Image (spheres, rainbow, N blue to C red):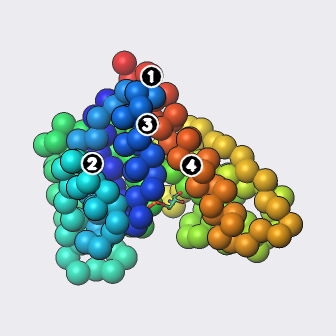
Amino acid sequence: IRLGILGSGSGSNMQAIVDAIDSGELNAEIALVLSDNPDGFILERAQKAGIPNAVIDCHGFKTKFPDAAQAAIGQQLKDAGVELVCLAGFMRLVKAPLLEAFPNRIINIHPSLLPNFPGLEAWVQAVEAGARESGCTVHYVDAGMDTGPIIMQAMVPVMGDDTASSLHQRIQVEEHRLYPAAINHISEQLR
Ligand code: GRF
């Protein structure tokens, strides 16, 4: 399966996908990595792995993802032969122009057991709520925020002495296992 990956930050989930492909665990190919953040480490990781990559032009908007930009990305991903779009720490909300270019073919990884703690910094939310467990979720993307159908989840315990950052680290270990597994699962269903 040919993947397109969209991210804004460190790209550790993208790296986990690259590593799973290299080790033969995941039968996929990353066709294109796109970042709305020109300084995102995800772009450096893509360069290092020899994967085509580019910056998304959001027309100067800090958080908004203009329709024209979404349509342009849709076209760029199509041109690259992308079959499944994976959001990996992508901080803008995907809407109609991109959703319609890839119906049921956009997935996201979120650092909580959805529907609990959607939105930003879910690991902070979990610690502040005194949750006893949290985890991560891979789900299809719809027009809501972290609301689409769930594909796979992994649970992690929240310890009494956890800080937001220690919990996030524990969740990320599971994310890096879960995301490649979920992509494998989808690609087998599509075959
Ligand atoms: C992950 O925790 C992911 O669940 C969330 O943003 C973070 C991205 O991390 N959506 P990275 O850029 O993959 O390292």
Q: Please, what secondary structure does the residue beneath circle 4 have?
A: helix
| Amino acid on which disc 4 is placed | Glu
Lower sequence index among marks 2 and 1: 2
Neighbours of disc 2 within 10 Å: few (<14), some (14-19), many (20+): few
**Mark 1 falls on what kind of element?**
helix
Q: Callout 4 environment at 10 Å: few (<14), some (14 to 19), or many (20+)?
A: many
Q: Which residue is mark 1?
A: 189
3 vs 1, front mark: 3
Nearer the observer: mark 4 or 1; the answer is 4
* Disc 3/disc 4 C-alpha distance (Å): 13 Å
In the drawing, what numbered circle is on residue 129?
Answer: none
Report crowding for label 3: few under 14, some 14 to 19, many 20 or more residues within 10 A (C-alpha). some
Marks 3,4: beta carbons within 8 A: no
Helix, strand or loop status at disc 3: helix
In space, the residues marked 2 and 3 are separated at their CA atoms by: 13 Å
In this picture, residue 2 sits left or right of residue 157: left
Residue at 34%, 74% in the rendered image? 64
| Image location of residue 148, percent across then percent down | 52, 48
Label of residue 49 in the image: 2
Residue bearing mark 3: 20
Q: Is mark 4 within 8 Å of ligand 1?
A: yes
Residues at badges 2 and 3 in contact (C-beta under 8 Å)? Answer: no
Q: Quick check: is the Cβ at mark 3 less than 8 Å away from ligand 1?
A: no
Res. 31 visible in picture? yes
* Furthest residue toward left: 79
Quadrant placement of the N terminus: top left
Q: Identify which amino acid the numbered label 2 is placed on.
A: Ala
Which residue is tagged 4? 175
**Residue type pointed to by label 3:** Ala
Q: At which x and y percent is residue 142?
A: 45, 50
Circles 3 and 1: CB distance less than 8 Å? no
Q: Nearer the viewer, residue 97 or 78?
A: 78
